[in-house]
Image (spheres, rainbow, N blue to C red):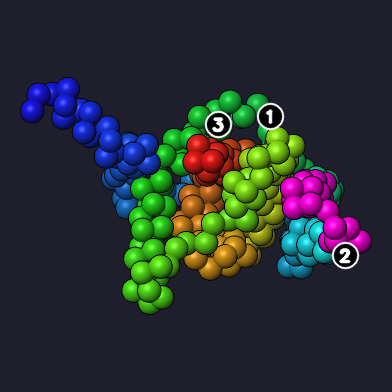
Amino acid sequence: MNVSEIIRKLAGVITLADIICVTGLPLFACWLLRTSLGRNALADSTPRRNNMSLYLPFIPLFIWFGAVVLATSISKEFLPDLPDWQAARLDHALLCTGGVAVIVVMILLVRTHFARRLKGLGLNPKTIHKDFFAGFVNLLSVWPLVMAMIILTTHLGKLTSGQDFQIQQHEELKTIAAHPQLSVKVLIIITTVVVAPVVEEMLFRGLFQSMIRGLADRAWTAIILTSVLFALLHPWTHWPALFVLSICLGYAYEKSGSLFRPIFIHSIFNAASVISVLRGV
């Protein structure tokens, strides 16, 4: 067997996810060595000054997970005969609109309760170019751990629930695969890649993690508790992988002080999921 045949056989076996994992492993190993296994990783991190009450982050959380769901339910009640693809388009239009409303609410809260307002939260446009590249590297570094959690969850699920067990696919990914209409796909991409990352990072990292960090004054405690909350608000089969991803998001926020960095990590992660589904359609 010559070299070209070996390369062709490997190309048929090795996937893009494998290549990403192999690339990410040395980056993660370097981070462990450089930070004494993570112990010194956030030694220079400082809390973001704010005067938020304990209940305050729950206001946008209720709007995002409560009011938007209520609006979707009402639309189904009044428009029960819509074709599936039109119902999906309406649902995601409401989700986008609700997401924008939640962002506006959070901006108002931040302007009232954070020192230096949006810059105090970590939204400084001057850092966008640097945060995009750094966010990509951060995601690449944690990708092997996320994939390991997915494999572990699948393995444990098959042991406990039978060989037919599969990790539940996210609802948006199911919808984008089920409907070929361009307007549905565009709305889902906007929701998944733009609106959801901005809303969830402002909410979980910006508000909840900042509040917990201010109370506990320990960066890793704030990151872990926020990650638990973030994972719990998703389907249970996603918990291990999303907890690990959320640790990365929280770390990137505390290390850089910029909220753009976890937003970019979250957006790239979601975009990769959407692309993988679209390639299979």
In this picture, is 261 found above or below 215?
above
User: Residue 77 bears which disc, if any?
Assistant: 2
* Magenta residues, start to end: 74-98
Q: Quadrant of residue 62?
A: bottom right
Q: In this view, does 163 lie to the left or right of 174?
A: left
Q: Is residue 8 left or right of residue 269?
A: left
Q: Residue at x 59, y 63 (%)?
A: 234
- In this rendered view, identify the residue nearer to me: 91 or 133: 91
What secondary structure do most residues of the magenta stretch adopt? helix
- In this rendered view, identify the residue nearer to me: 220 or 247: 247
Q: Which residue lies furthest to the left in this view?
A: 1
Residue type pointed to by label 1: Pro
Residue type pointed to by label 2: Glu
Report the residue marked by disc 3.
132
The quadrant of the image that shows the N terminus is top left
Residue 10 lies, in percent from the top left, at 22, 34
Q: Residue at x 81, y 59 (%)?
A: 72
Report the residue marked by disc 1.
125
Q: How far apart are marks 1 and 2 (CA)?
A: 42 Å
**Residue 249 on the magenta span:** no
Element carrying mark 1: helix
Q: Which residue is drawn at 39% across and 52% down?
A: 147
Front: mark 1 or 2: 2
Residue 175 lies, in percent from the top left, at 64, 50
Residue 7 lies, in percent from the top left, at 20, 28
Q: Quadrant of residue 157?
A: bottom left
Residue 195 lies, in percent from the top left, at 71, 43
Element carrying mark 3: helix
**Residue 96 on the magenta span:** yes
Choose the circle earlier in sequence order: 1 or 2: 2
Q: Quadrant of residue 182?
A: top right
Callout 2 crowding tier (Cα within 10 Å): few <14, some 14–19, many ≥20: few
